[in-house]
Image (cartoon, coloured by chain):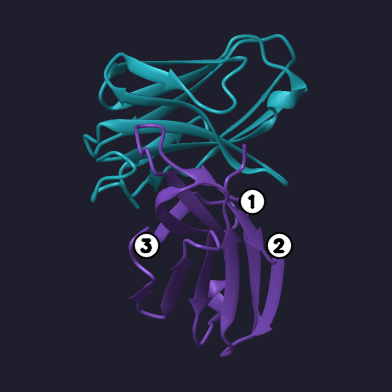
Chain colours: A purple, B cyan
Amino acid sequence: SQQGEEDPQALSIQEGENATMNCSYKTSINNLQWYRQNSGRGLVHLILIRSNEREKHSGRLRVTLDTSKKSSSLLITASRAADTASYFCATVDWAGGADGLTFGKGTHLIIQP
Amino acid sequence: DAGITQSPRHKVTETGTPVTLRCHQTENHRYMYWYRQDPGHGLRLIHYSYGVKDTDKGEVSDGYSVSRSKTEDFLLTLESATSSQTSVYFCAISEGLADSPNNEQFFGPGTRLTVL
């Protein structure tokens, strides 16, 4: 069953603006990861945040995690046309294991030039 | 891109025929995964492997089988393809378990399969 649920499903903003996407999940997690998928391509890992972390930064990306609300957000600052893609959150259950990630359905982000 | 290739990249087949998709990696990573991606469902895990000859089922394994006879190759077989298996199939690899420090998954370019 789907673990993560991204919100919104689609987002269109102007270049230079900030984009915020949210992810909610259902069970206790070990970590949460965000991936990007450009049209017709495979997914690319962006950032990982562990359950004992509240915020993490990587370049123009900022991820927050609120385990009490079982939610995470991905902020992309100063968006660029090249950021146009689908973004997925993926969770790793607390028990971990070899079965890996459970993905949400994704947010499709469009950056208008 | 990580050294992952998938073949074929596109395939059209008929209902009832067997189909095998191949994932090949040059990274010597231990863990390999097969996902399918469908509109409205995101990515769902079909099968995964945690070593040569070691495989297990994922969330949507019915109608699929896998084999891993070498570290570098992970095969996904649709025993008798159905229209519901029309999808985009992605292979992924990772060096470590999902809860380990080196758990990032690297994805292949995908195979678009159409079952008529």
Find the distance from the CA under tag 2 to the CA under tag 1. 8 Å
Which residue appears farthest toward the front when viewing the image?
A: A68
Residue that mark 1 sits on: A105
Residue B49, given in percent of the width and then of the height, sits at 36, 24
Identify which residue is drawn at 42% across, 45% down. A92
Q: Secondary structure at mark 2?
A: loop
Can residue B115 be seen in this snapshot?
A: no
Q: Which amino acid type corresponds to the residue marked 1 in the rendered image?
A: Lys
Q: Are marks 1 and 3 in contact (CB under 8 Å)?
A: no
Q: Which is more N-terminal, label 3 or label 1?
A: 3
Vertical placement of residue A106 versus A77, above or below: above
Find the distance from the CA under tag 2 to the CA under tag 3. 22 Å
Other residues around mark 1 within 10 Å, as few (<14) / some (14–19) / many (≥20): many
Same subunit, labels 2 and 1: the answer reads yes
Q: Which corner quadrant holds the N terminus of chain A?
A: top right
Find the distance from the CA under tag 1 to the CA under tag 3. 19 Å
Residue that mark 3 sits on: A49
Q: Secondary structure at mark 1?
A: loop
Residue that mark 2 sits on: A9
Give the image quarter of residue A61: bottom left
Other residues around mark 3 within 10 Å, as few (<14) / some (14–19) / many (≥20): many
